[in-house]
Each structure stands twice: as C-alpha cells, then as structure tokens.
Image (cartoon, rainbow, N blue to C red):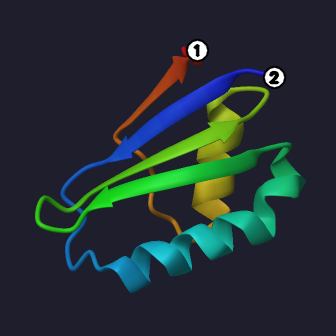
C-alpha cells in the first residue's frame, strides 16, 4: 500500500495535547477509509504537524482527517522509506 506524509501548516493554538487528541480521532476512523496512521510529528512554535500514513490514495487519507477532526493537510506527498 502507498505510504504518504502530510503536513498541516499554521495550525492555530497547536499543543501537544491537541495533536495527540486529533491523532486519536484519526485512529478511531482510519479503518473506514482503508488508512493506517503510523506516526506523527509536530512543531508547536510553528504550528506544524506531519502525519505518516499508509492508504490506497491521498484522498483516502484526506477523507479520514476530514471525518476525524476536519483538519485537512496543506500538502500530501507519496513517500518511500529509506534506510
């Protein structure tokens, strides 16, 4: 299954707790969209969040985020894992 990295930029009021909560909601709905959210990273000062997920398409990842919390990514890029 393809692997994607998305980035959410300039998220106002970003906190570690808010990111953890959004990720938990992603995990609750991911199966309905054929998505598996694997990891996330964030930069509180910049208001940036990065999500790594496997999905059949970019659109499936976007649909899962939309249903989970409505915070859509600014960019979604297909990536390949290196060593």
Residue 31: horizontal and vertical position, in percent?
87, 55
Circle 1: element type: loop
Q: Quadrant of residue 35?
A: top right
At a point 59% along the width and 59% down the height, the residue shown is 66
Q: Indicate the quadrant containing the N terminus: top left, top right, bottom left or bottom right.
A: top right
Residue 12: horizontal and vertical position, in percent?
20, 72
Within-10-Å neighbours for mark 1: few <14, some 14–19, many 20+: few
Residue 80 got which mark? 1
Residue 1 got which mark? 2
At a point 49% along the width and 34% down the height, the residue shown is 5
At a point 65% along the width and 34% down the height, the residue shown is 59
Residue 38: horizontal and vertical position, in percent?
66, 48
Q: Is residue 20 left or right of residue 44?
A: right
Mark nearer the viewer, 1 or 2: 1
Q: Indicate the quadrant containing the C terminus: top left, top right, bottom left or bottom right.
A: top right
Whether residue 70 is situated above or below residue 4 in the rendered picture: below
Residue 15: horizontal and vertical position, in percent?
29, 80
User: Which is nearer the N-term, disc 1 or disc 2?
Assistant: 2
At a point 72% along the width and 21% down the height, the residue shown is 2
Circle 2: element type: loop
Q: Quadrant of residue 7?
A: top left
Q: Residue furthest bottom?
A: 17
Judge by depth and name the residue closer to the eye, 33 or 83: 83
Judge by depth and name the residue closer to the eye, 70 or 4: 4
Q: Residue furthest left?
A: 45
Inter-mark Cα distance, 1 to 2: 11 Å
Q: Quadrant of residue 53?
A: top right
Within-10-Å neighbours for mark 2: few <14, some 14–19, many 20+: few
Q: Is residue 39 left or right of residue 40?
A: right
Q: Residue furthest front?
A: 83
């Amino acid at each position: 299954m393809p692997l994607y990295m998305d980035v959410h930029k300039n998220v106002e009021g970003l906190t570690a707790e808010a990111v953890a909560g959004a990720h938990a909601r992603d995990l609750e709905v991911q199966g309905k969209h054929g998505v598996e959210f694997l990891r996330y990273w964030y930069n509180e000062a910049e208001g940036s969040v990065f999500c790594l997920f496997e999905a059949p398409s970019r659109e499936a990842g976007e649909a899962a985020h939309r249903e989970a919390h409505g915070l859509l990514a600014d960019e979604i890029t297909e990536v390949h894992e290196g060593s």
